[in-house]
Amino acid sequence: MKFDDYASQILALGQGKVFRAKDLDSLGIARVYLRGLVDQGKLWQPGRGLYTATDSPIEAHQSLAEVTARCPKGIVCLLSALRYHELTSEDPSEVYLMLPQHSRAPRINHQSLRIFWATGQSYSEGFIEQPISGILVKITTPAKTVVDCFKFRNKVGVNIAVEALQDAWRSQKVTADELWKYAEFCRMTQVMKPYFEMMVA
């Protein structure tokens, strides 16, 4: 096959999604062709080992896909999850990521990360998987996100946690049962109860 044939296959792979250099292995295409396409301006490299076609539409949450591609164990959480669920108008400059306890924080040069660690159900429960730019991204649910904001209130601020609770409740994106389910295994029931009771009174 000629370079143009390999190029068309690679560019097709990068349409509407982020792909990894190793994804070429299953197509039998040498990774050396990637550099040529980047130099020609046909591929964009958002991060080490990550590529997308330059004429591909950029999704609003593509940075979450880029981080997930480099850190599959990560779960988008806190302010980044609030933004995804449209529970805040703020656009955090960092990606908030939850990892299992004792795991190593990833080093991603092009992306600022804020890492939080969790154990047991606090890590394994309360997230959805959403396809973004061709990558399945794990994101905490609205209810789990609210509970996490209270759990890490010393990091994100009590005001953020209270506003998240109010916005999620007002927009009907959470139920009381969901909130208390996650509050229980995150040990946040007593912390959240006064704010919840004041809100629904």
Image: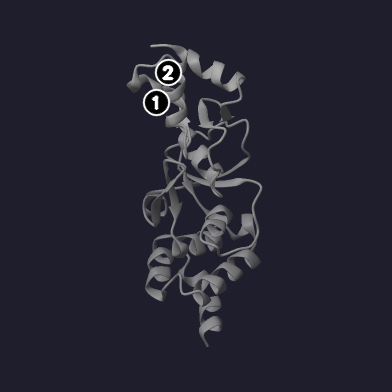
Number of disc labels: 2
Q: Position of residue 63 (x, y in %)?
A: 56, 42
> Element type at marker 1?
helix
For the residue pair 156 and 59, the one nearer the viewer reads as 59
Question: Which residue is located at x 49 percent, y 41 percent?
Answer: 65
Q: Nearer the viewer, mark 1 or mark 2?
A: 2
Q: Residue at x 33, y 22 (%)?
A: 26
Query: Residue 146, percent across and down?
Result: 51, 64
Toward the viewer: 184 or 23? 23
- Within the image, what quadrant is residue 38 found in? top right
Q: Earlier in the sequence, mark 1 or mark 2?
A: 2
Residue 193 appearing in the image: no
The residue tagged 1 is 23
Identify the amino acid type marked 1: Asp
Rendered position, 96 above or below 106: below
**From what the image shows, is residue 119 above or below residue 82?**
above
Q: Dividing the picture into quarters, in which one does residue 157 lie?
A: bottom right
Left or right of 151: which side holds 156? right
In the picture shown, does residue 108 fall above or below 37? below
Q: Estimate how packed mark 1 is, as few (under 14), some (14 to 19) or many (20 or more) residues with alpha carbons within 10 Å.
A: some
Secondary element at tag 2: helix
Residue 43: image tag? none
Instruction: Give the number of the disc on residue 6.
Output: 2
Residue 142: tell me if it is visible: yes
Question: Label 1, label 2: how many angstroms apart (C-alpha)?
Answer: 13 Å
Amino acid at pointer 2? Tyr
